[in-house]
Image (cartoon, helix red, strand yellow):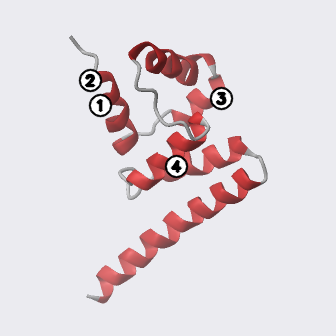
């Protein structure tokens, strides 16, 4: 039982460390640093499926607007984020788990 608690404590410690760092950076107006902190967290196998971290990343990437629900707007946004904005594209590179699932779900809305 103590091993389970230890593992949970370790998870929360890492989770909150990244969230605190992102929050502090965002408050200071350093959005790139805030996005970097959440992206680093999502690259960790033990955090890659955390929906709250993905929500936070989406919030930071979209200025709080959330993922676009319009097909052309979403696809253009993804092109901008992944290709046209090299820094953000590199930041998102290698993130799997919930982030990938969420993006795939958005694309699946418009498959014909």
Relative side of 109 to 49, left or right: left
Task: Reply above or below: 42 against 108.
Answer: below
Alpha carbons under labels 2 and 4: distance apart: 22 Å
Q: Which mark is on residue 87?
A: 3
The crowd level at tag 4 (other Cα within 10 Å; few <14, some 14-19, many 20+) is: many
Which quarter shows the C terminus?
Answer: top left
Residue 47 visible in this rendered orientation of the protein? yes
Specify which label sits upstream in the sequence, 2 or 4: 4
Alpha carbons under labels 3 and 1: distance apart: 24 Å
Mark nearest the camera among 4 and 3 is: 4
Residue lying furthest right: 28
Image location (x, y in percent) of residue 78: 49, 22
Q: Which mark is on residue 56?
A: 4
Alpha carbons under labels 4 and 1: distance apart: 18 Å
Looking at the image, do the residues carrying marks 4 and 3 touch, with CB atoms under 8 Å apart?
no
Image location (x, y in percent) of residue 105: 29, 31
Specify which label sits upstream in the sequence, 3 or 1: 3
Specify which label sits upstream in the sequence, 3 or 2: 3
Specify which label sits upstream in the sequence, 4 or 3: 4
Task: Reply above or below: 83 against 93.
Answer: above
The crowd level at tag 1 (other Cα within 10 Å; few <14, some 14-19, many 20+) is: few
Looking at the image, do the residues carrying marks 2 and 1 touch, with CB atoms under 8 Å apart?
yes
Tell me what residue is drawn at x 57 percent, y 41 percent.
64
Alpha carbons under labels 4 and 3: distance apart: 18 Å
Q: Which mark is on residue 108?
A: 2
The crowd level at tag 3 (other Cα within 10 Å; few <14, some 14-19, many 20+) is: few
Q: Which residue is mark 1?
A: 105
Say what secondary structure mark 4 lies in: helix
Say what secondary structure mark 2 lies in: helix
């Amino acid at each position: 039982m103590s091993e389970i608690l230890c593992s949970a404590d370790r998870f929360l410690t890492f989770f909150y460390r990244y969230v605190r760092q992102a929050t502090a950076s965002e408050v200071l107006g350093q959005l790139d640093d805030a996005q970097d902190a959440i992206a680093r967290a999502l690259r960790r196998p033990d955090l890659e499926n955390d929906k709250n971290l993905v929500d936070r990343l989406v919030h930071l990437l979209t200025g709080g607007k959330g993922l676009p629900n319009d097909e052309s707007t979403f696809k253009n946004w993804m092109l901008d984020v992944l290709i046209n904005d090299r820094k953000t594209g590199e930041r998102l590179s290698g993130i799997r788990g919930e982030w990938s699932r969420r993006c795939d779900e958005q694309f699946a809305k418009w498959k014909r």
